[in-house]
Amino acid sequence: MRTSLINSLLFTLMLFLIPLQLQAKDMVVKAPPESLGKYYPPESKEPKWIQQMHKMSGNLGGVFVNLREKDWDNLDKNADQFVESYKEASEMVPEWEEYFDLKAAKEFAAAAKTHDGEKIGKAVGAVGKTCGKCHADNSISVWTRFHWPSFHKIKITDPIEEKELDFGKYMGLLSGTFKGVTVNFKEGQYDRSQKALRAFKSRFMELKSTCSKCHTTDDVKLFYVGENVAQAFDGLQKELTAEKPNPGNFWKNVGILGKQGCKNCHLTHRSYAMIQERWEEK
Amino acid sequence: MKVPNILKKTVPVAVGLVVLGYLTLYFVINQTPQWIPENLTRLARQADLLENPEAKRCFECHKEIYAAWKKSRHAIAWVSETYIEDSENRSKEKCLPCHIPRQVKNGEKPQPRLDHRDDGIYCVPCHVIDGKMHGPYDLFSPPHPTQKNLQYRESKFCGSCHEKTFEEWKIAGVEDTCQSCHMARTESRLVQKPVLSWLHSKKQVGDHSFPHGEITQEDLAVTGEISGKEFIVTLLNQKIPHRVPTADNGDPRLYLYVRFLDDSGQEVDRFKEILAPQQDTALLYGKEARFQYPLTAPVRKVEISLQYKPAWSKDKSEWRQLSYPVTGDSG
């Protein structure tokens, strides 16, 4: 009975924290406040803001874990530390001061110390709302600004021209070279298509080096530019040098490159890169 | 001027005693340092040496090793422009453990440190372990306690950070270690500050500039031949027991350029290969890499050029040029 009450409380807490982010149907992703920059590298040696969030959420979650386990000593400690870490967070970013409600945090801690699940459940609502509101307004922008790599800062040396290009320009070049392969094939100009394929392969494989600047494990590289992609390139080459190229095989391999190489990467990275680009434009 | 008799007798004796004393001390320090009472040695300890000092503190005694290290890429691991650019102004956390290690242990990935970051990879993270200065020799060293540790001669030690290269070396299965080539030993003194520099015998000291080494023609064989309607270039890494080039996260490259020329010396076609660890195209030890190029037009000469670009530079340097005349019908 008591366990189910606590589980309901946890569920309620999650309801407060997560779905609030979904309330706003028309979302504006504003760049985060300047002052937040000092809590992230390179200004800070460590990502202090996210560490503070973990600390706070650890204390808050700790109260409910301790409640479930009837570990009252630790529950009291977590309740006090929650107020402390909540207060610390409220003082870190002046632009966000109004998101915080210290009174609600203190009332939650006081309720927590009664060790009464019902009272705790009621009290967490008010303070949980403050977390949820801030997350709903700012999570995406903070993650985009501080946790995703900045594509616009990446430079790539084009393996064909051996000139250093911005990431966006390079992608445009890559896409243009790819079209050189497919358009010429459609027109039956296989020699030209083959020449374009050579350049496209070289430019495509160059991304292995670029991606490895962030993706240090081989798994990611193998996923985007691994065996399947290498086989697709071989397949395209085979068709283009055949006496009578088979369009079915050609387009099947184009599809593999498009899905495995382009689409998967774009699905993961493009939205964030687009937001970053828009901020940069300002 | 007349020398007093007393001096005539005492000076040679004094000189003799000094020489004898020096020889005795030299013998004891180099051969039987355990005879020196520990309490006496402790009086000369300089406690700050074990409290993560800056590299220039080590320079006060180890001038030659410091000068060599200062020339190395290790010394600029934190301040190099390439590193700053590639790590997005040092914001990539994954780079920190090896660019500013707190302590390098045999085969373990280090943790990053917070102090003296400009020194990059320097004396303290590699040599100070548990309050002692570790190295390949057992030494009498009053300023700081020492500990003989032969791990410094093992490739595994370098493998703490150079993980991929270490794996490549293991697969190569050769006896030479990383240190054999990149820390070649010469006879020298560890200390260049009196009085220890007068009292320590010479030792085999590793080159702390960690030289990169030049690729010789013996190391890397390059051949070109016509086979039917194709020109085939073969590269063979014969002697370097890791990939060429190699790097864990850097992007060194070997460029292979192949140009086909006609009767009038005009370029008919050209090809390029990028041999790079990050593209999985670097040359494996003992394994041939073959590149086939179609001869689509009449060709009279094939020119091959190999150029090297280190990870820390955008410039390439010519490593080797070869030229193959083509006789008979081609293309």
Image (spheres, grey):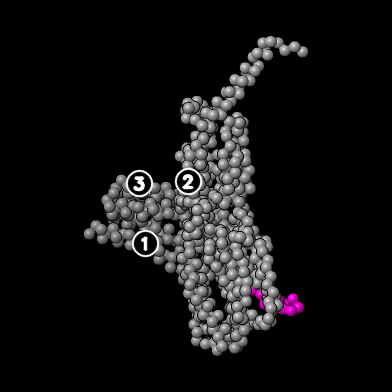
Q: Chain of mark 1?
A: A
Is the C terminus of chain B in the top left, top right, bottom left or bottom right quadrant?
bottom right
Amino acid, disc 2: Gln
**Picture residue at 56% right of the left edge, 63% below the top:** B237
Circle 2 SS class: helix
Please give the range of residues in magenta. B261-271
Q: Nearer the viewer, residue A55 or B162?
A: B162
Q: Which x, y percent locates residue A86? A: 43, 51
Mark identifier at residue B307: none
Q: Is residue A12 left or right of residue B277?
A: left
> Does residue A260 appear in the picture of this structure?
no
Q: Chain of mark 3?
A: A
The answer to whether tags 2 and 3 share a subunit is no
Which residue in the protein does label 2 denote? B151
Q: How far is mark 2 from mark 3, CA to CA?
A: 46 Å
Which residue in the protein does label 1 denote? A14
Instruction: Classify A102 as above or below B257.
Output: above
Circle 1 SS class: helix
Q: Nearer the viewer, mark 1 or mark 2?
A: 2
Question: Which residue reaches farthest front?
Answer: B328
Circle 3 SS class: helix
Q: Which x, y percent locates residue B10? A: 64, 14
Q: Chain of mark 2?
A: B
Q: How far is mark 3 from mark 1, CA to CA?
A: 22 Å
Q: Given contact means CB atoms under 8 Å apart, are the residues at marks 1 and 2 in contact?
A: no
**Picture residue at 46% right of the left edge, 63% below the top:** A136
Which residue in the protein does label 3 denote? A77
- Mark 3 / mark 1, whichever is N-terminal: 1
Q: Is residue A135 left or right of residue B272?
A: left
